Image (cartoon, helix red, strand yellow):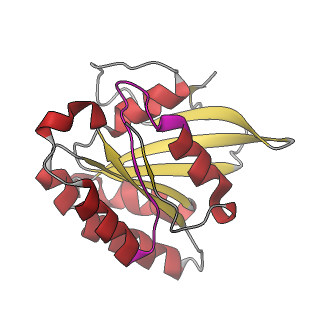
Amino acid sequence: MGSKQSTEQKRADKTVVFIGHRSGKTCLIQRFVEEKYIPQYSKNEIECYSKEITLGDKVLSLEIIETSGDDADAQPRYRRIQEANLFFLVFAITSRPSYSCLPQFLREIKQIQKQEEKDPTIILVGNKTDLEEERQISYEEALEFAEKEEIPYIEVSAKSGDGVEDMYDSLIRGGAVNRKNVKRAR
């Protein structure tokens, strides 16, 4: 079971950073860590979680960090990108503004990671598939962006849980996953 990160905990084996703007990142984190959907939460309350997972015969400690797309969060976001090498680039399929931020966030990740001489694993995540009737970004449009950027694309629903485990499995396995692998949760 996951928990909120404390400063006294051991260093994580992997640091996972969520980047996006009003895309349901917090609900995706809570769905994975707490194994439930929490529709209402205090934004300032949740920033960093930890969870242990098993990958083959190895137990990994994950540090899961959420960072917003707001300009006010630019400096902390820079540090988080600098320290991590696993990223979820999240948008809501129901929100054109959340999708429009993706190129800027992706450039930021790649630029900072290049300076750190890292090869990041990045997955594009379309959240809120439970709201299909409100969809503003087609699957094909998001897939085209992902293919152009050579990153995997997956659609999920934090509310129903569809695709959430696959999303984390794909990211954690990193290099073992074909970067052009795409999945669509329904």
- The residue at 59%/30% (across/down) is 6
Q: Is residue 161 left or right of residue 98?
A: right
Residue 183: % across, % down: 46, 51
- The residue at 52%/30% (across/down) is 32
Whether residue 38 appears in this view of the structure is yes
Residue 97: % across, % down: 13, 54
Above-or-below relation of 151 to 64: below
- The residue at 26%/69% (across/down) is 104
Read off the magenta span. Answer: 149-165
Name the residue nearer the viewer: 176 or 10: 176
Whether residue 9 appears in this view of the structure is no
Where on the picture, by quarter, is residue 47? top left
Q: Is residue 99 left or right of residue 174?
A: left
- The residue at 60%/25% (across/down) is 2
How many numbered dots are placed on residues in this image?
0
Image quadrant holding the C terminus, namely top left
Q: Main secondary structure of the magenta part?
A: loop
Name the residue nearer the viewer: 121 or 147: 147
Residue 109: % across, % down: 42, 69
Where on the picture, by quarter, is residue 83? bottom right
Name the residue nearer the viewer: 65 or 94: 94
Residue 176 falls inside the magenta stretch: no
Residue 55: % across, % down: 76, 43
Above-or-below relation of 182 to 149: above
